[in-house]
Image (cartoon, rainbow, N blue to C red):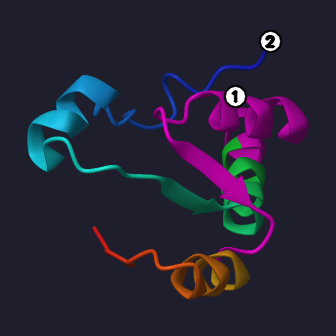
Amino acid sequence: MATIRGAAPINRLTPHRLGHYFGSVSMDVLLCDFALGHLAKRLASKKGQDVDAIHRELRNAFVAGAFAAPSGIFGLARAQNAGCAFIRV
C-alpha cells in the first residue's frame, strides 16, 4: 500500500477535537474530489507511487462527517440550496 506519511504533514484534527471548536453543532465537510485527484497526482509523482493508491489513502483519511463530491463547486451549490452554510477555513 502506498503511503504519504512522509510527504506532507497530516492534519490531526480528529472528530473529538473538531467538537471542541464547534460544540454540538451538526457539521458535514464537503471536499472536492476533482481537487483531491490533482493533489494525489502531485504526491504520487513526487513519491514515485501509484496515483490511485494515493487517492484512496487520502479519501480514507477524511474526518468523520466528511465526504467527497465529484465537483466541489456544484456540490457546494447543491448543499447551499439545501440550507447548508459555507465556511472557508
- Disc sitting over residue 27 in the figure: none
> Residue placed farthest to the top in the image?
1
Q: Between label 2 and label 1, give the one nearer the viewer.
A: 1
Across and down, in percent, residue 61 comes to 56, 29
Across and down, in percent, residue 34 comes to 76, 67
Left or right: 5 with respect to 38? left
Question: Where's the C terminus, which quadrant?
Answer: bottom left
Above or below, comparing residue 80 to residue 3 in the picture:
below
Across and down, in percent, residue 50 comes to 88, 33
Helix, strand or loop at label 2? It is loop
Residue shown at 77% from the left, 57% from the top: 37
Q: Earlier in the sequence, mark 2 or mark 1?
A: 2
Residue shown at 24% from the left, 50% from the top: 25
Task: Report the amino acid beneath label 2.
Answer: Met
Foreground pick, 28 / 49: 28
Give the residues in magenta: 44-72
Residue shown at 31% from the left, 74% from the top: 87
Helix, strand or loop at label 1? It is helix
Left or right: 28 with respect to 59? left
Label 2 Cα neighbours within 10 Å, binned few <14 / some 14-19 / many ≥20: few
Left or right: 11 with respect to 17? right
User: In the rendered image, which residue does mark 2 sit on?
Assistant: 1
- Disc sitting over residue 57 in the figure: 1
Task: Report the amino acid beneath label 1.
Answer: Glu
Label 1 Cα neighbours within 10 Å, binned few <14 / some 14-19 / many ≥20: some
Q: Determine the image quadrant of residue 15.
A: top left
Across and down, in percent, residue 83 comes to 47, 79
Above or below, comparing residue 31 to residue 43 in the picture:
below
Distance in Å between CA atoms under marks 2 and 1: 9 Å
Q: Is residue 14 visible?
A: no
Above or below, comparing residue 30 to residue 49 in the picture:
below
Q: Determine the image quadrant of residue 36.
A: bottom right
